[in-house]
């Protein structure tokens, strides 16, 4: 970092500091750029009425002569415009004005959803964190600062709605929840302010050379005057974190652990705060009747792997918005609570059922022969691609049609190809079959995309269709009676048969055993299985967004 700011209590002291910096710079073959340097002097209130003359510092080195800044001048430090005697509220307003424009360009760009979130977290949040870190002794109440942070969060959420990155009624708690728990992973300005205050407090408490300053701030806090110590106390109390400050040893004790390093202390406290925030937000999301239903599944769903696609975020923000809205029940279908005034609740496309989100995405006959088929095939192609890679076949480009049969010396790969059997089999055309010639094994893979409440039922239907009775006329009626089936026919022909049902939720939901089955039955390593799963989820989410846009565009 080449930006440096020096503080001194007199012009002579400042001169000595400048000379030291110039000397060290010279030793490492660097020099001060006088054209980009300046100095300014602050006169305390008690000396305002006195005749105090302030002149530029005079160094023995004639090449060092910095211009003076007046009290209203603006300068940049670390790329951020700053000003002497700038009031805290003004600093917040100026930062918001600049950051809002940056955020608008960011969320309006063609970056992927995760790139936008990461860019927001790394460009917007640090600005407000920096402002908070500069306030060791503030005016007003700290609660007012946090409220300002909350208002700023709300303004940026409105920007996301305006730029089609989220729906207005989407869950706010989920927006700031970590990606490991199914959230967007966006950072909150309010939380960033709190964390910045904790870092400043930790530095003050653990540096022996700052004992005098610490004693001053502790005295101010005890007198109920706002300072970094009182601000940190209010934060620790809000998060129920007990601590003991040992001023003589410059040590802070939390839960029996002693900390005398500022970074270690701050990171420990911030980690406790983040855990509390994530837990609160997750429970808030889960308690919501409609929005949180995905977290209360009756099936054995994997609530970590189900959100892998969101964690990777390799989609447009519009596609993510549409998919999340479907999962949370935010889409304005005719059965949505906001449409209670409307008497017509039937599906606008087929007119044969109530227009629920579940019907639109998994049961509307209007989209069955077209969008549903493309949706299904897009998911299945992800598995086909991985199988081709594993066994040395050339996978087709996504813009090309998949060949019905691909073959080499080791395997024969069927794609939606009928299998010749001795007995008459009605369902003899699974999505994918992998015939391993040397091992004499056959892997039947059947793919489906389902609303998350019907995933287990789809697995049972697929398994029954190919392993119990392939001639059963009532496809959707469980249980199937025993009868001729494709698995038995292949076994009779001398193949050792394995069946793999792959059912992905409309918004990427998966059962807990799917990732393991992909690795075990197809023979993928952990990374390849994880990548295959994410690709299938991404395809499912893209198809969901496409169906939603087509459906809601209809009359």
Image: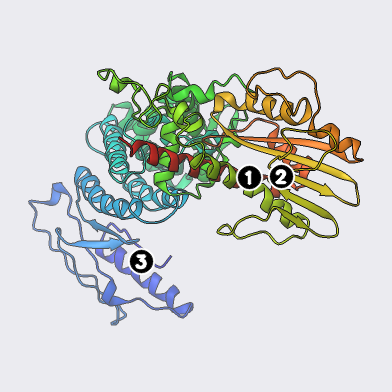
Question: Marks 2 and 3, Cα distance to the nearest angstrom?
Answer: 74 Å
In this rendering, would 206 be left or right of 57? right
Q: Position of residue 453 (x, y in %)?
A: 56, 23
Q: Is residue 197 visible in the rendered structure shown here? A: no
Observer-nearest residue: 143 or 470?
470
In this rendering, would 254 be left or right of 497? left
Query: Could you say which quadrant of the image residue 547 lies in?
Result: top left
Q: Residues within 10 Å of mark 1 (few under 14, many from 20)?
A: many
Instruction: Name the residue that disc number 3 marks.
Output: 17
Q: Is residue 406 visible in the rendered structure shown here? A: yes
Type of colouring: rainbow
User: Decide: marks 1, 2 in contact (CB < 8 A)?
Assistant: yes
The numbered mark at residue 380 is 1
Helix, strand or loop at disc 2? Answer: strand
Observer-nearest residue: 228 or 421?
421
Answer with mark 1 or mark 2, whichever residue precedes in sequence.
1
Q: Measured along the vertical axis of the image, is residue 344 above or below residue 153? A: above
User: Decide: marks 2, 3 in contact (CB < 8 A)?
Assistant: no
Answer with mark 1 or mark 3, whichever residue precedes in sequence.
3
Question: Marks 1 and 3, Cα distance to the nearest angstrom?
Answer: 67 Å
The numbered mark at residue 432 is 2
Q: Position of residue 462 (x, y in %)?
A: 69, 30
Q: Position of residue 405 (x, y in %)?
A: 73, 54
Observer-nearest residue: 276 or 106?
106
- Which is closer to the viewer, label 2 or label 3? 2
Observer-nearest residue: 299 or 353?
353
Q: Which corner quadrant holds the N terminus?
A: bottom left
Q: Measured along the vertical axis of the image, is residue 397 above or below residue 193? A: below
């Amino acid at each position: 970092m080449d930006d440096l700011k020096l503080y001194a209590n007199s012009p002579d002291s400042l001169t000595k500091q400048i000379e030291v910096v110039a000397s060290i710079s010279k030793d490492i073959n660097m020099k001060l750029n006088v054209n980009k340097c300046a100095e300014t002097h602050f006169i305390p209130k008690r000396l305002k009425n006195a005749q105090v003359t302030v002149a530029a510092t005079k160094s023995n080195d004639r090449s060092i002569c910095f211009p003076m800044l007046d009290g209203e001048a603006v300068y940049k430090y670390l790329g951020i415009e700053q000003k002497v005697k700038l009031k805290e509220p003004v600093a917040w307003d100026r930062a918001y004005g600049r950051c809002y424009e940056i955020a608008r360009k960011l969320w309006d760009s063609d970056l992927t959803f995760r790139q936008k979130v990461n860019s927001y977290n790394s460009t917007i949040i640090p600005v407000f964190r920096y402002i908070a870190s500069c306030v060791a002794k503030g005016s007003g109440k700290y609660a007012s600062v946090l409220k300002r942070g909350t208002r700023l969060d709300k303004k940026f959420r409105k920007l996301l709605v305006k730029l089609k990155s989220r729906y207005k009624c989407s869950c706010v708690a989920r927006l700031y929840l970590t990606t490991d728990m199914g959230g967007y992973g966006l950072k909150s300005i309010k939380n960033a302010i709190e964390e910045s205050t904790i870092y400043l407090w930790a530095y003050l408490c653990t540096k022996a050379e700052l004992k005098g300053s610490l004693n001053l701030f502790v005295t101010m806090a005890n007198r109920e005057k706002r300072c970094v110590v009182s601000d940190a106390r209010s934060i620790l109390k809000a998060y129920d974190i007990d601590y003991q400050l040992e001023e003589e040893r410059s040590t802070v004790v939390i839960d029996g652990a002693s900390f005398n390093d500022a970074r270690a202390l701050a990171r420990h406290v911030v980690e406790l705060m983040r855990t509390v925030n994530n837990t609160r937000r997750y429970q808030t999301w889960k308690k919501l009747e409609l929005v949180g239903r995905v977290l209360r599944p009756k099936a054995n769903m994997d609530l970590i792997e189900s959100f892998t696609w969101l964690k990777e975020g390799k989609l447009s923000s519009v596609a993510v918005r549409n998919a999340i809205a479907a999962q949370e029940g935010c889409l304005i279908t005719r059965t949505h609570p906001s449409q209670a005034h409307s008497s017509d609740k039937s599906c606008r496309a087929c007119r044969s059922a109530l227009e629920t989100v579940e019907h639109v995405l998994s049961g509307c006959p209007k989209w069955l022969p077209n969008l549903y088929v493309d949706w299904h095939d897009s998911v299945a192609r992800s598995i086909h691609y991985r199988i081709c890679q594993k066994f040395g076949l050339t996978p087709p480009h996504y813009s090309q049609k998949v060949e019905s049969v691909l073959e080499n010396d080791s395997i024969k790969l069927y794609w939606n190809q009928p299998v010749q059997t001795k007995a008459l089999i009605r369902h003899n055309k699974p999505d994918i079959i992998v015939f391993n010639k040397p091992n004499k094994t056959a892997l039947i893979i059947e793919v489906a995309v389902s609303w998350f409440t019907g995933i287990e039922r789809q697995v049972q239907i697929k398994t029954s269709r190919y392993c119990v009775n392939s001639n059963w006329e009532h496809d959707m009626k469980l249980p199937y009676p025993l009868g001729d089936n494709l698995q038995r026919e292949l076994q009779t022909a001398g193949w050792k048969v394995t069946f793999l049902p792959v059912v992905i939720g409309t918004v990427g939901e998966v059962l807990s055993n799917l990732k393991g089955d992909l690795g075990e039955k197809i023979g993928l390593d952990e990374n390849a299985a994880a990548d295959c799963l994410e690709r299938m989820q991404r395809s499912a989410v893209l198809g969901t967004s496409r169906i939603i846009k087509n459906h809601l565009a209809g009359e």
